[in-house]
Image (cartoon, helix red, strand yellow):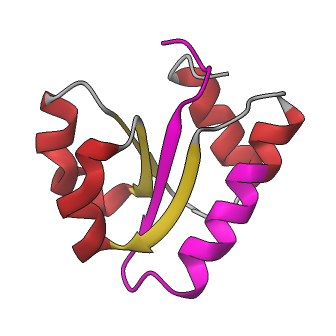
């Protein structure tokens, strides 16, 4: 997967505090690795499920990964995290998935 102009979606249960913090952690990791994202968006799971196929990479809590099965079938990368606010974990998962 080429990392040029990828779009990222960060989802949490309610789409308020933790997904915003996760978005900020993701943006920090992307900047550190010189990746310019086409778009980075955070939202609640309800919105994320319906809009996931519009993004290249979806990040969420591990327990919610199965909610994005349709996006995975369409070739989207879905990354489950133990701690969505952990920049080191986000960076490790992006590396494991060939994004950085």
What residue is rendered at 52% in x and 87% in y?
16
Tell me if residue 3 comes above or below residue 81 in the rendering: above
User: For residue 90, what is the image quadrant?
Assistant: top right
8 magenta-colored? yes
Percent of width and height locating residue 56: 40, 34
Residue 63 in the figure: left or right of residue 25:
left
Q: Is residue 93 left or right of residue 21?
A: left
Q: How far across and how far down the image is residue 25, in percent?
A: 74, 58
Q: Quadrant of the C terminus?
A: top right
Q: Residue drawn 68% across and 51% down?
A: 26
Observer-nearest residue: 39 or 47?
39
Q: Vertical placement of 84 versus 27: above or below?
A: below
In this view, which residue lies farthest toward the top?
2
Total labels: the figure holds 0
- Say above or below: 100 vs 65: above
Q: Which quadrant of the figure has residue 36? A: top right
The residue nearer to you, when weighing 22 against 3, is 3
Region of the chain picked out in magenta, as a range:
1-27
The quarter of the displayed image where residue 95 is located: top right
Residue 33 relative to residue 43: left or right: right
Image point (74%, 29%), residue name: 35
User: How far from the left and from the top, in percent, is residue 31?
Assistant: 84, 40
Q: Is residue 90 magenta?
A: no
Q: Residue at x 50, y 67 (%)?
A: 42
Q: Position of residue 64 (x, y in %)?
A: 28, 61
């Amino acid at each position: 997967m080429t990392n040029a102009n990828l779009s990222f979606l960060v989802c949490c249960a309610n789409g308020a505090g933790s997904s915003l913090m996760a978005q900020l952690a993701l943006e920090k990791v992307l900047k550190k690795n010189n990746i310019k994202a086409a778009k980075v968006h955070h939202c609640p799971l309800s919105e994320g499920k319906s809009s996931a196929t519009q993004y290249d990479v979806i990040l969420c809590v591990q327990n919610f990964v199965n909610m994005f099965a349709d996006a995975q079938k369409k070739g989207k990368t879905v990354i489950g995290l133990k701690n969505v606010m952990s920049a080191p974990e986000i960076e490790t998962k992006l590396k494991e998935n060939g994004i950085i």
